[in-house]
Structure formats: structure tokens, C-alpha cells
Image (tube, grey):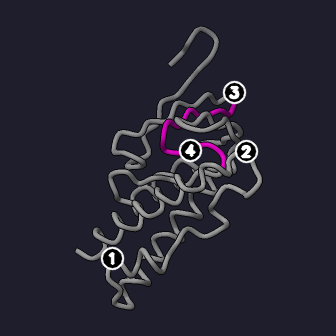
Amino acid sequence: IDLGGRIVQLHHFGHGNTPGDTVVYSPDAKAAWTGNMIFGTAIIPWAIEGKSGEYLKSVARMKQTLDIKTIVPGHGVITNGTMVDFSLTYLAAHIETVRDSLRKGHSLDETLALNPLEERFLPPKGSPLENIRPLTSGFHRWNIKKTYLELSD
């Protein structure tokens, strides 16, 4: 889309936080308005409708396609492109955690109890974002539940 001297692109990389996640990208600014596909600094992805595996693939496609320096998220503070890698790392680790739990024959309740959100994915203690640690832990529990139910079918 030509906005009169500024080009912006609309990208749909697949299912993310929801099936319709669309990213608005300004190539000259290397800025992406990601909505809830990528949250602000230190906030893990929330697979609100499940499909963590598809979410992972969508974020990977976004990384391969766009050169992102700045992210304007749907929630949280403006951040940089490293949140794409943070999101990819979390989603991959989260999916493998659930797969491992299923291989071991754990129930959903056992999987939730045995797999709290790792410290590396929580906002740092003492930081201005420390107060959202319970929120990110809640996102993680939701993600575990949705992924467990999908993978156990």
C-alpha cells in the first residue's frame, strides 16, 4: 500500500495468536505492527485458540520474510526484533515439553504441575515488567493445556 511516499505491506503468515493475525510492515523503517502475534518485551506468545505448532511456523515465516528492527505489539511496550527469536524459542520449547510429557504418559494435570514457565521466559525480577509474571505464567498454562489436548488427539 502506497501511503504517499511511504510503502506499507500487509502480511499473513498463517495461524498465530488467532487465525487472522496480520502484520503491517514498513520496509524502509524495518518496523512491524504485529498485533498479538508478537507481544511486547518479555511476554511469551499466547496461543489463544491453540495450534502452537502452526503459530511456531507462522513466526518462523515472518522471520524469514521480514527484516524487523522495531516491533509495535498489540500489547506491551514497543520492542525490537529480538522478540521474534524469543517467541520462536518459547514456542519450540513449549511444544517439546508437552510432547515429552505425553511420551511419559502424564495426564494434563501432571503436565501442568510438572512444567511451570521457565525463568528464562518470565519478565526479570526487579524489572518494571515484574508485575506481569503471573499473567505470563497464565498464558503458559493455557498454552500447555491447548497443546496437550491437540497432541493427545
- The kind of residue on which mark 1 rests is Leu
- The kind of residue on which mark 3 rests is Asp
Query: What residue is shown at x 36% (from left), y 45% (from top)?
Result: 18
Magenta-drawn segment: 28-41
Q: Image quadrant for the C terminus?
A: bottom left
Instruction: Please determine whether, in this image, residue 50 is positioned above or below residue 5.
Output: below
Closer mark to the observer between disc 1 and disc 4: 1
Q: Determine the CA span between mark 4 and mark 2.
A: 16 Å
Q: Residues within 10 Å of mark 2 (few under 14, many from 20)?
A: few
Query: What residue is shown at x 49% (from left), y 36% (from top)?
Result: 35
Residue named by callout 4: 39
Closer mark to the observer between disc 4 and disc 2: 2
Query: What residue is shown at x 69% (from left), y 51% (from top)?
Result: 82
Residue 100 image offset from top left, x and y in percent:
44, 84
Q: Determine the CA span between mark 3 and mark 1.
A: 46 Å
Residue reaching furthest top? 4
Relative to 6, 100 lies left or right = left
Name the residue nearer the viewer: 130 or 67. 130
Q: Which of the marked residues, 2 or 1, is nearer the chain's N terminus?
A: 1
User: For the stretch drawn in magenta, what is the main secondary structure?
Assistant: loop
Residue reaching furthest left? 153
Residue reaching furthest right? 126
Query: What residue is shown at x 49% (from left), y 69% (from top)?
Result: 94
Secondary element at tag 4: loop
Q: Residues within 10 Å of mark 4 (few under 14, many from 20)?
A: many
Residue named by callout 2: 128
Instruction: Please determine whether, in this image, residue 111 is positioned above or below residue 131.
Output: below
